[in-house]
Amino acid sequence: MFYRRAGIRHLDYRHERQLWPLPFDRLLVGVVVALLLAAPFLVDRLYLVAYLLPWLIWSSAALGLNLLMGGAGQIHLGYGAVMAIGAYTGVHLVRLGAPLELAMLAGGLASALIGVIFGFAALRVKSLYLAMATIAMQYIVDFGITHIPGVSGGGMASIAVPPVRFLGVRIEGDLPTYYMALLVCAIIAMFMLNVGRSALGRALAAIRERDYAAEIIGIDTFKFKLLAFWTSSFIGGVVGSVLVVCYLRSVSPEQFHLDLSVQLLAMVIVGGLGSVLGSFFGAALVLFAPIVFDNLIGYGADRLGISLGADLRAHLPLMLYGALIIAFLVIEPLGLAKIYDNVRNYFLVWPFRTARR
Amino acid sequence: MKLNRRTFVAGTAATALIGLRPAFAADEKIVRFGMPQDFTKIYTFVTAEYSQGQRDYFSLINARGGVGGYKIVADVSDHANDLPRAIEAYERLKREGMVLVDPLSTPVARALVSRALEDKVNLVTAFSGRSDAADGSVFPYVMPLSPNYWTQAGLIVDFFRQQDKDLKGKKIVLVHIDTPFGKEPIPIFQALSQKLGYTFETFPYTPPGNDQAAIWPQVRRAKPDWVVFWGAGVGQTTALSEAIRNGIPMDRMSSSVWLSESDMDVVGKEAAKGVIKFEPCAGGRSPKVVADILKEVAGKGAGAGPEGKIGTAYYNYGVMMGAIMTEGVRVAAAKAPDGPVTGPWLNEGLTSITDFTAEGLLPAMTVTKEDHQGGGKGRIARWDGAKFVPQTDWFSANQDVVWAEIKKSAETFKTTGK
């Protein structure tokens, strides 16, 4: 049905390799982009500041992590720390008078530098051992931040973000923060979409599948593993700055603890390893399923006059959320993006039953 | 599998489509409080007891016809100490007209400070958040409304002084969780050691504090005269168990507000006999408000939780905070009976609370536009194996040192945002 492939002829390689060869895909992307651009005028303020904004930011972070985990197959349990380095570098530089654009890039570079140091572990160890090495990074960075008053901001360990401008626009209020996050997210998403069809992306995919096989076919695994850590950490650092500037408005150590790393890891896995779309789906599910369930149960209990005990009332949403994640992964182990893909494949050949890619 | 998937998609879609706005009677005059708190992550049973106390108090007031013509609606939800969830709850409740939010979590309170100051929503940070928010001239909408950690440290040291007559040459050690919260009281202990002549040492343990085996032998070797242990949740019970194992005398150990009967169940009621803590309000069921709740709310089956928890330390903290907020509404309604109910309206009331004791539950409390702490009074109580027994009358001490620190820190916030 919708995804009509009749009449599409590839006359050269460039044409064949375009991102969205099907007109319907292009239309869909166009509609989603238009909706996101128009969102501040379409949806209630609550949904803009409390749903869309964090969704864009967390999706950007998940995309960065996905490059490393889905793209290069290197597990990272300290991505929150990577973001913290970027956030703190960015905020301190802004406070010293640097323009936000530069501070964000510098935050990214600082994250990339420190990230790549821990990335060296990836040259020696794999999978679970690498997970341990990156968890160590999380704790070392946490410790460093809380114990250096110059970094954390002293006794209260909280630093407010001063008024900033981004590309000439003052970042305050709902619209500028939203559009700034949207712009950064769009840039990262475009990068991620394109990286898969670049030499870097192919080299990373080869390493992901089997690194010694990659070595045999002439890929410098040393270089590309570090490059993956570098790029992914850079994105994390930039998103860290966006997170504190656009959303949290102040920076303190507990915002970047292991919880955040695990949350991002869950987004990537539930969404779909290596999938751009999946990062967005995963971020939405992990961020909002507990909130939606909590609101629904509160609303339902109010409406139906059921009095739930405080404990049950608080834990029921989490039980449902856990069940939902398990259910999604049982139905489709490859993540939410694959569920979308299945639907798309179904319509691709509809009314026939088997999809041939 | 196909059917499952379809049901699944339909179910998810239905979840997304149902409207989330609860309905309330439109003709009643209400004041809306937001209570997104952490029921599931770190504070768990602390929040459960605290929230139960708060809700029972509001039920009591509403059943008696409200206060100043207003009914109190408290919207309780779980933010699990997660910032996106807390900010969502804050923004959602703000849309519904919330004039006061009580997140009972330091990270969340910190993240909400700039929003609350901007939106003019009263952010209650009782026993959490920034200690320097006691300075109302810098933080007009951040309301600790309770003795902050610096005051607690000041009162605890003064109790030591009362016991020993003179602290000169004595040694006080602070065993604390190694987080900003754990390090918060250090400046006060240091300033007072200069003044009173005791030596002061700190022993940090790594968060969350469920393993402190390495630190307590060091504490024992330091031969302290007094030990203050500073943590929350699991860190507190672990600290007590380790102290008992290392033979540190219980009657020389003191906690901040974060110690309750439930902790004693874990440690062992007999073993922890003698340990002392700071008390911001009376415990037990004897205070009149708590007795009233037992009779008029729990007695009629309208209690918010298990009846056995009524009168525990954290339950009474909840009642205390509920009573202070309600008193704020009463004063606000006395000043401007017809509202409109807004953040500034309630702020007027909260900052004009004078000599409020909640019928003997708490020490006389006076909040002003400058002093959001409410005077900084409290008392010291000792665990006698079954309950906490007050050792002092309500008192206040070392407020000069505390306020110097508050002013210094608030000034830093004002000029640098730190």
Image (cartoon, coloured by chain):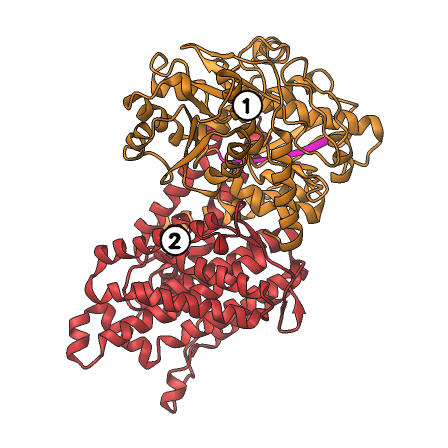
Magenta residues (range): B31-38
| Real-space CA distance between mark 1 and mark 2, rounded to the nearest whole angstrom | 43 Å
**Closest to the observer, B109 or A36:** B109
In percent of width and height, residue B67 lies at 75, 22
The chain drawn in red is A
The residue at 47%/14% (across/down) is B382
Is residue A307 found left or right of A226 in the rendered image? right
* Residue A149 in view here: yes
Q: Which mark is residue B158?
A: 1
- Mark 2 surroundings: few (<14), some (14-19) or many (≥20) residues within 10 A: many
Pointer 1 local density, CA inside 10 Å: few below 14, some 14–19, many at least 20: many
Q: Is residue B73 left or right of residue A189?
A: right
Q: Where is residue B318 drawn, in percent x and y? A: 57, 24
Residue at image position (59%, 42%) is B20
Residue type pointed to by label 1: Asp
In this rendering, would B323 be left or right of B266?
right
Residue B112, how many percent across, how many down?
60, 45
| Amino acid type for the residue under numbered disc 2 | Ser
Left or right: where does residue B334 sit relative to residue B172?
right
Q: Which residue is mark 2?
A: A261
Q: How many marks?
A: 2
Q: Colour of chain B?
A: orange
Q: Disc number at residue A215?
A: none
- SS state under label 2: helix
Please identify the dominant SS of the magenta region: strand
